[in-house]
Image (cartoon, rainbow, N blue to C red):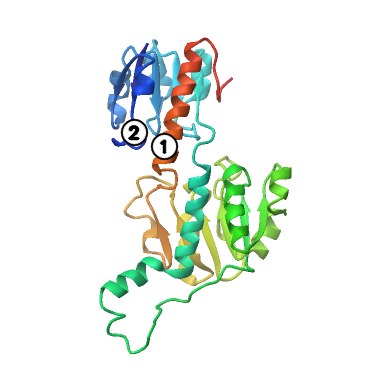
Amino acid sequence: MKIVVLDGFTLNPGDLSWSGLEALGSVTVYDRTVKEDIVSRIGDADAILTNKTPISAETLASCPSVKYIGVLATGYNVVDTLAAKERGIPVCNIPTYGTAAVGQFAIAMLLEICHHVAHHSDAVRAGRWSSNVDWCFWDYPLIELEGKTIGIIGFGRIGQRTGEIAKALGMRVLAYDAYQSDAGKAIASYVDLDTLLKESDVISLHCPLFPETKGIVNAASIAKMKDGVILLNNSRGPLIVEQDLAHALNSGKVFAAGLDVVSEEPIRADNPLLSAKNCIITPHISWAPKESRQRLMDAAVSNLATWSTGKAQNVVNP
C-alpha cells in the first residue's frame, strides 16, 4: 500500500515516529503541501492523510488511485466528504485524542487572565520587585474564581473536562448543548443559551463549527452578557465575529478574552483582535502536547490498519 502524508509537520515535528504507518506500507511524508502541489504529491497513492491540506472533488477526480482518506484531526471540513463518498472512499477522522489537553488549556488561559503570571514574572526579572518600596506589587486586578459562574457552550467531552476543572476551582458550572447527558448533569446545570449568557462571569466555547454555531458570539449575543465577562475560545475561530468581539473588548463590555483559535489561520496581520485590549491569542496549540499528538498518531494508524483489513472505523461519510 502506498501512503502519502500531505502535511505531517504539526503532528510530528520530529519527536514522534512514523513507524506505525511504515508497518502498513510505503510512506512518503511531506511537512506541508501548497495547493498547487496536492495532486502531484498524491500521485498514485492508495491512502492519503491530511490535517489542513484541502482535498476537493477536483483533486479526487485527478487522483483515481485514492481509496482511503485519513484526517489527522477531529474536524474534517478540509475534505469534500460527499465527493469522496460518491467515489466509495471512506474519510476517517480522530474523534477524540486531546480532551485533557484542550480542557487544561482553556483553564490555563483563564488563570492567566486572572493573575497575569507571565507579566509579573517579566516585571520581577526587569528589576521591578528588587527596587520596589513595598514587599509586593501587582499591575492588574487579580481575580479569584471561587464562587463565580462559568458558562460552557458545547458540553461534549472537552466541554465536560473544562467544567470538571472549573468545578474543582469552586466555580458554578452552566452548560448549553443540544444534547444533554447524565455525565454532563453530574458536572453542570443545563440551561438555555440566553440564561447562560446572562448569568456567566466566564464563557468558554467548546462547540463544533456548524452553520448554526458560526458567529454564535456576535454583537447581539455579547449585549446579553454580563458587563466585564471573560470569554474563552479554543474550539473553532469562526464561532466568533471577531470585529464584534474586538469592539466589546475595547469598550470594556468584555473584560478579557483568551483565544487559541481565530477565523483564519495563520492569523492575518489585520485581524482586529491583534490590537484589541486584554486579548490573549495563542497559535492554536491547545491540542499539541506530545501525549495528545501520540494518541492522534496511534489513532490514525489504527484507522488505516482497520481499513486495510476490509473494515473501517471512525468513518465520517458512511
Q: Are marks 2 and 1 in contact (CB under 8 Å)?
A: yes
The x and y percentages for residue 141 are 47, 76
Circle 1 crowding by C-alpha within 10 Å: few under 14, some 14–19, many from 20? many
The x and y percentages for residue 39 are 32, 20
Image quadrant containing the C terminus: top right
Circle 2 crowding by C-alpha within 10 Å: few under 14, some 14–19, many from 20? few
Residue drawn at (40%, 24%) of the image: 49
The foreground one among 101 and 214 is 101
Q: Is residue 88 above or below residue 256?
A: above
Q: Is residue 221 above or below residue 97?
A: below
The foreground one among 87 and 73 is 73
Q: Which residue is mark 1?
A: 293
Q: CA distance from mark 2 to mark 1?
A: 8 Å
Displayed quadrant of residue 19: top left
Q: Amino acid at mark 1?
A: Arg
Residue drawn at (44%, 64%) of the image: 112
Q: Which residue is mark 2?
A: 16
Say what secondary structure mark 2 lies in: loop
Q: Amino acid at mark 2?
A: Leu
- The first of marks 2 and 1 along the sequence is 2
Say what secondary structure mark 1 lies in: helix
